[in-house]
Structure formats: C-alpha cells, structure tokens
Image (spheres, rainbow, N blue to C red):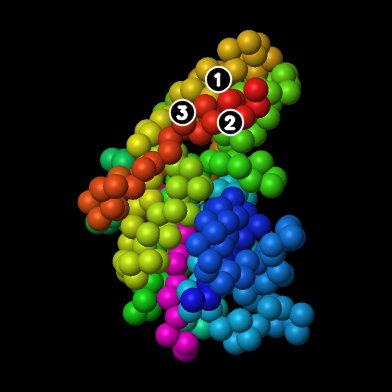
Amino acid sequence: MKILIIGASGLVGSHCTHVLKNEFYDVVGTHLNFQTPETVYYDPLSVSEKNLQLDNVKPDIIIHCGALTNVDYCENNERESEIATVLSTKVLVDYCNRNNAKLIYLSTDYVFDGEKGPYPESTPTNPINVYGKHKLEAELLVKSLDKYIIARITNVYGEEERSKNFIARLVIWLQQNEVKKLDLPIDQFATPVYAGDIARMLLCLIRDDKTGIYNLSSTDYYDRYHLALKVKSFFRDNTSVILNPVQTAHLNQAAKRPLKGGLLNIKFIQQYPDFEFSNVDSFLKTLVNNEI
Ligand SMILES: NC(=O)c1ccc[n+]([C@@H]2O[C@H](COP(=O)([O-])OP(=O)(O)OC[C@H]3O[C@@H](n4cnc5c(N)ncnc54)[C@H](OP(=O)(O)O)[C@@H]3O)[C@@H](O)[C@H]2O)c1
C-alpha cells in the first residue's frame, strides 16, 4: 500500500513517516519550504513541472498535514490562510475522488468555540477565528469523499527537526538556561498529545480501514501555564525561565482563542482499549533520562 504524507517535514508528518516506514508501508513524504532527507517538494497548488505529480506517485492513501498553522498570522492574512488550508485540500480531495484513494486529514479542536470543551466528535462545530474557520471548510470538503478520516488533534508535542512546538521550545530554554519571562494563559485549556501517539493511532485506523471523524488526544488536560509548570518541574535547578500566569485577554492576540478547548478520545479508546498512551510526564521522563 502506498501512502503519501503531505507535510512530512513537520511535527506530525515526520512522526507518521517513521511509524509507517517501520511497518513497511511504501511511504512518500513531502515538504514545502523545509527539506529533510526524507522529503520531496510538493505544493498542491503549483502547476510547475518540477512539482511532484500525484498521478505518478499513485497513492492509495494521502495523509494531509499541510496547513497555515500560525493562528494569529491567519487572522491577519485571511486569503493566504484560505489558499494554504482550504484550496490546497481541495486539490487532494479532487485527486482522491478521481482515483478512489483515501484522504486522512489532520484537523483541530479550533473548529469548536471553546465554550464547553473538551469535546467529543459529535459536538456541533462553531469556529471563532480564521484558522478554525478554514480548517472546518477543509473538513467539509474532505467529508464529501467516500473514504476519509478526519483526525482532530490539539497541542501536539514531540521531537522534531525544528523544535517548533511549545514543549520542545520550552525544554530547550530550560536546558540552556536562557533568560526568559513567559506570559502564559491560565484560562486556555486543551488536551496535549504526543506526535508519536498520533502516528500510532493513525496506524491502527489505517490497518483497520476505518473512516469518519476521530479525536486523537491522550490522557492530559492542561491550561498553558500549568503545562509549562509541569515541564519546568523536570528542571528543578532552573531559575532563568520565569513563568507568569496571565488571562488570555491580557495577551492582545490577533485571533480569539477557544478557551475551554481540547478533545475527548472516547471513540478511539472504545475501539482500541489496549492502546498505550504516552503523556507529558512519560515524554519528559524519557527525555530527561536520555540526557543522563
Ligand atoms: N501542532 C499542533 O498542535 C496542531 C494542533 C491542531 C491541529 N494541527 C494540524 O495538524 C497538521 C500538522 O501540524 P504540524 O504541527 O505537524 O504542523 P507543522 O509542523 O507546521 O507541519 C506542517 C507541514 O505541512 C507543510 N505545509 C504547510 N503548508 C502546506 C501547504 N499549503 N501545502 C503543502 N504542504 C504544506 C509544511 O512544510 P514546510 O515546513 O516544509 O514548509 C510542513 O511539512 C496541520 O494541518 C495542523 O493544522 C496541529
């Protein structure tokens, strides 16, 4: 079975690449701006001859991790967000439609308004910012296919080449004793999930040919400030990184944030009761132990 991973140079896509290759799937991974040894260039909207041609790759499954993910940038650049997130997805939906391929689309808890999270899959959507609105528009395109999975995720952490994710960045600052004072919202809740777990959960869903919407979360539920405190607790000697709890309203962010966000993964757990989840604790323990 051939699997094309759009956005394999990113956090989720790189973990999917490793997990699926380990299981001997025939995997092709793509990047947009950041090439890695395991990726080839692909822009769904480019008509250049140098662009990867889907008709030559002939994937049975496409895992689509590509999106404009800077929420405040999306708010200020609505058209760019629409092009990167919605129109790019449309190209992949059209390919899957023509070729009877399956599309696995990585989505977000930002399709919800954050009034009553964490959310089960069945909750009516109601995005409150441009990023969430475009992710939902892309979801609706994906839902028009016969064979699809919408995998909703949030607050992803894990090892990645560029260490962009919140926990990875914080760990580097703590390890390197960088002097930082971080204003962190105490009223933005979500369900952090390890990128490696997302990849292993997707492997289960691929093997069993599942379709539909799945929340891929873990066992943690944190606000940003307490998540950072948890990370810092693994670096007890550090005095250079100061964590300052603030209300979201004080941050003057361009995009509104769903405050009580997060995702309930009851559907996945009911189908895979033996699945062993990582959590922030186990991830940090492994990280710190590997350093000694
Ligand atoms: N990380 C989170 O906490 C989180 C939470 C909720 C939802 N999600 C969703 O999960 C997906 C993956 O997130 P991530 O954290 O892995 O993001 P990431 O690390 O920023 O990776 C995104 C990947 O997609 C590529 N890409 C970006 N725009 C593209 C486009 N228009 N066409 C093709 N490729 C494109 C990027 O390429 P280059 O880097 O090479 O330019 C990169 O490989 C995204 O759809 C995001 O909306 C993530």
Indicate the quadrant containing the C terminus: top left, top right, bottom left or bottom right: top right
Contact? badges 1 and 2 (CB < 8 Å): yes
Q: Earlier in the sequence, mark 1 or mark 3?
A: 1
Whether the magenta-drawn stretch holds residue 99 is answered as yes
Residues under labels 3 and 2: Cα distance?
10 Å
Please state which amino acid type lies under the numbered disc 3.
Asp
Q: How many other residues sit within 10 Å of disc 1, few (<14), some (14-19) or many (≥20)?
A: some
Please state which amino acid type lies under the numbered disc 2.
Leu
Instruction: In the rendered structure, find residue 142 and report the number of the disc placed on it.
Output: none
- In the displayed structure, 174 sits above or below 98; it is above
Q: Determine whether the beta carbon of the residue marked 1 sits less than 8 angstroms from the nearest atom of ligand 1.
A: no
Q: Nearer the viewer, mark 1 or mark 2?
A: 2
Q: How many other residues sit within 10 Å of disc 2, few (<14), some (14-19) or many (≥20)?
A: some
- Residue ID for mark 1: 234
- Judged left or right of residue 136, residue 5 is right
Please state which amino acid type lies under the numbered disc 1.
Phe
- In the displayed structure, 190 sits above or below 10; it is above
Residues under labels 1 and 2: Cα distance?
10 Å
The image quarter in which residue 145 lies: bottom left
- Residue ID for mark 2: 287
Q: Nearer the viewer, residue 20 or 140?
A: 20
Secondary structure state at the residue bearing disc 1: loop
Q: Nearer the viewer, residue 238 or 45?
A: 238
Whether the magenta-drawn stretch holds residue 180 is answered as no
Secondary structure state at the residue bearing disc 3: helix
